[in-house]
């Protein structure tokens, strides 16, 4: 059995037993979605182009409740021909203003990470700065492993979330009584905090901050950002800024970026445009000699129904330092259930 098949079998077994254990609590629901892409991209190395189909995401999301105050859920997926456990959580709803959530969950960081559901994305892909921020923060799908306290205050006008997590999502500390002693390569902690105000209908403004350190390797990371959204049909306006830095044994790398989105919905159609900027090394060239990446994305969303959405995107890409031939064209079919 291949490695990917073993992982898929493990996930299916996990899913089965989780459902069996939970069935006595009864309230089990299922959700999920499928993303199928056709993509076309310019290739800089030989001046030709590449194109093809990708089964980008197939997600299954069982969820439910054990009582009025305890909710659970997990996400499994088959993404780009790879099986994986994406998210798992249990949430203790003690009051509207105080909840405790434990598991592998979206960190309370950039709003454009998985705090925005993949099914709700304005474009086929998230902005470049968002994708880079997730990697620089050692997250998995913009998710971390830990415990979060969150809630709404002042009649739902203010939301807050604070999380303590591992500094690297993919590295877990797994001691056991069979071992005489214990070691952990990525020992440490990451702290996340986020606030968001919803002052009038459709208007959201917020900020986040994160700091973390892997103590054995002295690998430090921090990031921060702010966003301003106004989403009220037919207008879709979004602005977000993200910045951060990471240190590896005394070497500091700073990065920053932003994006702005403007869309206008007409019946089932939404023409939309995004301007994005990503600076990988505080204005200095990165490993391939680029100082700044700029993307202009033209998109058209068609909402066929509440279950089916079509997206078409053209991304005009330009770089400062070295100019590459790397424009992109996407078509995405989204089916939710």
Image: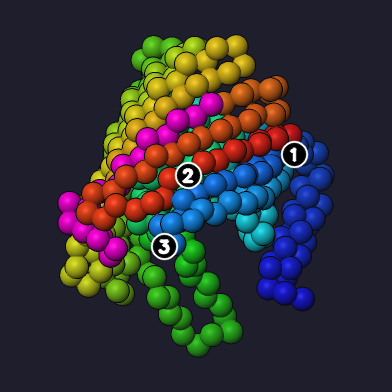
**Image quarter in which the N terminus is found:** bottom right
Q: Looking at the image, can residue 234 be seen?
A: yes
**Residue reaching furthest to the front:** 47
Q: Earlier in the sequence, mark 2 or mark 1?
A: 1
Helix, strand or loop at mark 1: strand
Residue for point 68% across, 40% down = 33
Q: Nearer the viewer, residue 82 or 106?
A: 82
For marks 3 and 2, give the CA distance.
15 Å
**What residue is shown with label 1?**
30
Residue for point 29% across, 63% down = 288
Residue for point 82% across, 44% down = 24
Q: Is residue 150 left or right of residue 287?
A: right
Q: Looking at the image, can residue 281 be seen?
A: no
**Image quarter in which the C terminus is found:** top right
Q: Is residue 215 above or below residue 152?
A: below
Local crowd size for mark 2, using a 10 Å CA cut-off: few (<14), some (14–19), many (≥20): some
**What residue is shown with label 2?**
328
Q: Is residue 195 above or below residue 234?
A: below
Residue for point 49% across, 12% down = 234
**What residue is shown with label 3?**
45
Residue 102, given in percent of the width and then of the height, sits at: 53, 49
Local crowd size for mark 3, using a 10 Å CA cut-off: few (<14), some (14–19), many (≥20): few
Say if mark 3 contacts mark 2, CB within 8 Å.
no
């Amino acid at each position: 059995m291949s490695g990917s098949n073993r992982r898929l079998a493990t996930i299916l077994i996990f899913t089965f037993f989780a459902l069996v254990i939970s069935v006595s609590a009864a309230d089990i629901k299922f959700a999920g979605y499928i993303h199928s892409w056709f993509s076309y991209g310019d290739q800089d190395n030989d001046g030709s182009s590449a194109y093809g189909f990708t089964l980008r995401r197939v997600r299954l999301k069982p969820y439910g409740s054990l009582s009025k105050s305890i909710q659970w859920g997990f996400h499994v997926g088959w993404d780009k021909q790879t099986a994986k456990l994406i998210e798992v959580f249990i949430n203790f709803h003690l009051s509207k203003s105080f909840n405790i959530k434990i598991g592998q969950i979206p960190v309370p960081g950039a709003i454009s990470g998985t705090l925005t559901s993949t099914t709700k994305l304005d474009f086929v892909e998230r902005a470049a700065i968002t994708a880079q921020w997730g990697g620089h923060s050692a997250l998995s799908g913009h998710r971390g492993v830990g415990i979060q306290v969150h809630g709404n205050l002042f009649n739902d006008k203010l939301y807050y979330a604070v999380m303590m997590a591992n500094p690297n999502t993919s590295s877990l500390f797994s001691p056991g009584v069979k071992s005489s002693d214990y070691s952990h390569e990525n020992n440490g902690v990451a702290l996340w905090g986020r606030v968001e105000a919803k002052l009038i209908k459709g208007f959201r403004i917020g900020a986040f901050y994160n700091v973390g350190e892997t103590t054995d390797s002295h690998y430090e990371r921090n990031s921060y950002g702010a966003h301003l959204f106004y989403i009220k049909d037919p207008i879709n306006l979004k602005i977000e800024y993200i910045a951060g830095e990471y240190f590896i044994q005394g070497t500091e790398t700073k990065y920053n970026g932003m994006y702005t989105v403007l869309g206008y919905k007409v019946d089932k159609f939404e023409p939309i445009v995004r301007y994005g900027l990503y600076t990988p090394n505080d204005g200095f060239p990165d490993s391939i000699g680029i100082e700044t990446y700029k993307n202009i994305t033209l998109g058209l969303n068609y909402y066929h129904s509440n279950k089916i959405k079509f997206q078409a995107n053209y991304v005009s890409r330009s770089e400062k330092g070295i100019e590459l031939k790397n424009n992109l064209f996407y078509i995405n079919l989204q089916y939710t259930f």
